[in-house]
Amino acid sequence: MCVMISKVNRTERIKIQALYVFVFLATCQQITLFNSQYFNLTWIGYFIYLIINLYTYKESFAFTKEINKYLFPIIIYWCLVIVMNYVFYEPDAKLIYAEIRQEFMGIVLMWMMINNIKQDLYKLNNVLNVFVASNLLLVFLYFLNIGVDYNSEGRVNIILNNSNSIAYWFGISIIILINKITMQKNISLYKKFSFVCIIVLFIIIIIKTGSRGGLITFLAGYIVYFLTINKTLKTKIYILIISFFIGVFGFNYIFKSPIIQKRMKSQKEDSSLGGRMPIWENTIDLINENPLFGVGPGKYEMRISENYGFKNTHNELLTILVYTGFTGLSVMLWFQIKLFYNIYKSKFTTLTALKYSLFFMFLIYMITAGGALPSLTTWVIFGIIASTKDSKYINNKLIFNKYQNRYGISKIR
């Protein structure tokens, strides 16, 4: 019996470690091997994680009431995309199928994460830590000038990751670090100072990306975090005062940034919103052809490609509407409501404000950018929100004392 328990523990350790490796490689999707889209570091990490979970498929892909409430609506949406793609089949459409495959793989990723984390706050905190470390690697590469390049507007890209993605990832990392500073008990002054320094570095590079959507997403996430954090009024006022002075300095720095000034100037001269307006107008025309169920991704690809070459809508809500109509949008809203309700049920815990913030950051990102659903980072965020109901684990002592029974860690006394 002891041997069986040991084998189970070893398998669980390997699975969760594979998840950490994948999350760390989440920012390396543009580093490809043999020039293959699916043979890059991120997807290699994903497939390793998948293969290990297939070894224990009964546990990793279990259907439970808790999991089905997320899987059911999102699988309905994905199936609706497939159906509408074949109802309005376009034999020459090619690029869109990668997007469909990546969304399915994202759903599988969320499914595995929910089963692997199993509401264990220790594992979840490690996932968050690894995600921040992955983004910190990009910071080091930036200052070492490794894999750094700039587009025609002077916006920074790091190891081929585009500016908007970098800004979005860094915004998430900043909120995670703020949550550690405000909610982690017995945190040393040295750690707080280190986290603040890292936050400053993240903000500097967000500004270097020139991503207005990234800035808006981060600011929205911070405001939601401040409003939902479970602190006394006195503490909130203290945080508000600090935020005000940092904000004044930050906005002064932002608006003096040559990249931001250049983008604001070009925006005033460009009535097409950076080429988005023509795409949105064509997308809305397509939606009007079948507002109830949409026209599928293949027809969208061909119609847009006729005039512009293939481009996404730069607005995920429009993408959902053009692919699956108001039926698909309703199903996606059903999925989002399930995620939101999960956060609401776990109120007043160490991760509640962070989860609210991540949830609303994703909603803003959906409106300000395209390609959110095919991105694996999106499904990591969904997995974090759906995996956690941490009302039982209010402080680190309870977390570690629970965890030591599984992995032999000494109790905290």
Image: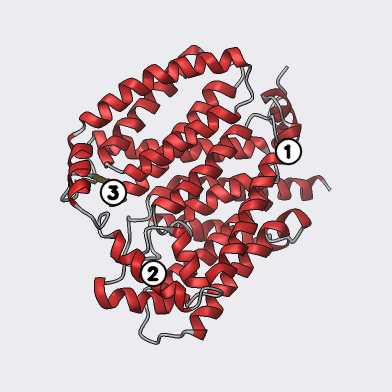
In this figure, which residue is indicated by the disc labeled 1?
406
Which residue is most to the right? 1
Residue 51 visible to an observer of this rendering: no
**In percent of the image, x 49 and y 43: which residue is there?**
361
Q: Amino acid at mark 1?
A: Arg
**In percent of the image, x 39 and y 53: which residue is there?**
369
Circle 2 packing at 10 Å, graded few (<14), some (14-19), many (20+), is many
Mark 1 to mark 3: distance in Å?
38 Å
Instruction: Compare residues 179 and 334 and report the one nearer the observer.
Output: 334
Of the numbered discs in the image, which one, if any, rests on residue 216?
A: none
Q: Amino acid at mark 3?
A: Ile
Residue 164 visible to an observer of this rendering: yes
At which x and y percent is residue 79? Answer: 59, 73
The vertical placement of 102 against 304, above or below, is above
In this figure, which residue is indicated by the disc labeled 3?
159
At which x and y percent is residue 212? Answer: 32, 43
**In percent of the image, x 30 and y 59: which residue is there?**
276
Sequence-first disc among 1 and 3: 3
| Tag 2 and tag 3, C-beta contact below 8 Å | no
In this figure, which residue is indicated by the disc labeled 2?
283
> Quick one: SS at disc 3?
loop
In which quarter of the view is residue 60 placed? bottom right
Foreground mark, 2 or 3, reads 2
The vertical placement of 235 against 229, above or below, is above
Q: Where, quadrant-wise, is the C terminus in this rendering?
A: top right
In which quarter of the view is residue 235 placed? top right
